[in-house]
Image (tube, rainbow, N blue to C red):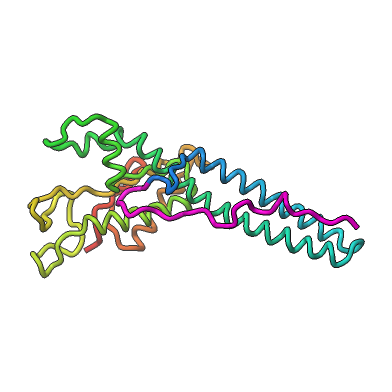
Amino acid sequence: MAKTSLSSTAPRDTATPRTDIASGPGIDRDPDGLTARECLARVEECLRRRDDAFAKASAAHRRLRSEGAGAGGASATYAASGREWDAKLRAWKLRHARQAARERSLASADAHLLADYATPATANPAPSVAAREHVDSGHFVDLHGLSVAQALIIVREGVNRWYAQEKLLEPSSGGVHGGLIDTVAARSGKGGLIAVRPYRIVTGVGRHSSGGEARILPAVEKMLTREGYRYESRDGQVVVRGLVK
């Protein structure tokens, strides 16, 4: 009986792809500097290798009756390889989603934010500088093109980091409620009064969703309500301003 080769499905790198994010407040660059397109190529490779491994596991299982235990061992090995590639696939999908959201946010930030957030100190910044500042500082994210599950992961990460950096004085240190109160409020520090910017989430209105109904928007609203955030929704956007008093 010919020896079964597993080289075609054995992972070249058994480590799970990195899905860590840096400590900055916004959506960070990919940990290895990959673009969304490069991450998507990894997604497609993992998908192909996973499906190939599971197909070979199924074929080996069907040969059990004629070849006995040897084929059963091959089936188990191929199945294990398929599960490993499936874990990598999920990790790469999330990594792609984060990078796609970052690139989309950088591309759309100017249109959504410049008019709202211009200040005397930055009245007419170069658009690319303004866009990068809003995204990198963790005040803006565009979720177009993501699944509901991916969008919720990114929003939860983003809103928690946004609140951590923008949290105001506790009640005992100045009478301000222990959470963001308004778009502009006082915060301790040498700078005195600081404009506290909300966290803006662009979800879209569902024009490209099945049935033309928004799916990400209601899911984001439900999550924010459940976790106690105060927000406003309008025109396919959610503006988070703080915690519910």
Which of these two is toward me, 22 or 117?
Answer: 22
Residue at 9% x, 50% y: name it.
Answer: 191
- Main SS of the magenta part reads loop
Q: Quadrant of residue 180?
A: bottom left
Residue 11 shown left or right of residue 141 in the figure:
right
Which stretch did the figure color magenta?
A: 1-28
- Residue at position x 28%, y 49% from top? 199
Residue that sits furthest to the bottom in the current view: 172
* Residue 8 on the magenta segment: yes
Image quadrant where one finds the N terminus: bottom right
Q: Position of residue 142 (x, y in %)?
A: 38, 42
Q: Quarter of the image holding residue 143?
A: top left
**Image point (88%, 55%), residue name:** 2
**Where does residue 232 sit, x and y in percent of width and height?**
28, 50
Between 105 and 220, the one lying in front of the other is 105
**Residue 75 placed where, x, y %?**
77, 61
Indicate whether 115 appears above or below 186.
above
Q: Considering only vertical position in the picture, is 188 above or below 203?
A: below
Against 50, residue 65 (above or below) is below
- Residue 202 place in picture, x, y as percent: 36, 43
Q: Is residue 4 left or right of residue 204?
A: right
- Quarter of the image containing the C terminus? bottom left
Residue at image point 30% right, 32% down: 111
Q: Is residue 222 magenta?
A: no
Q: How many marks?
A: 0
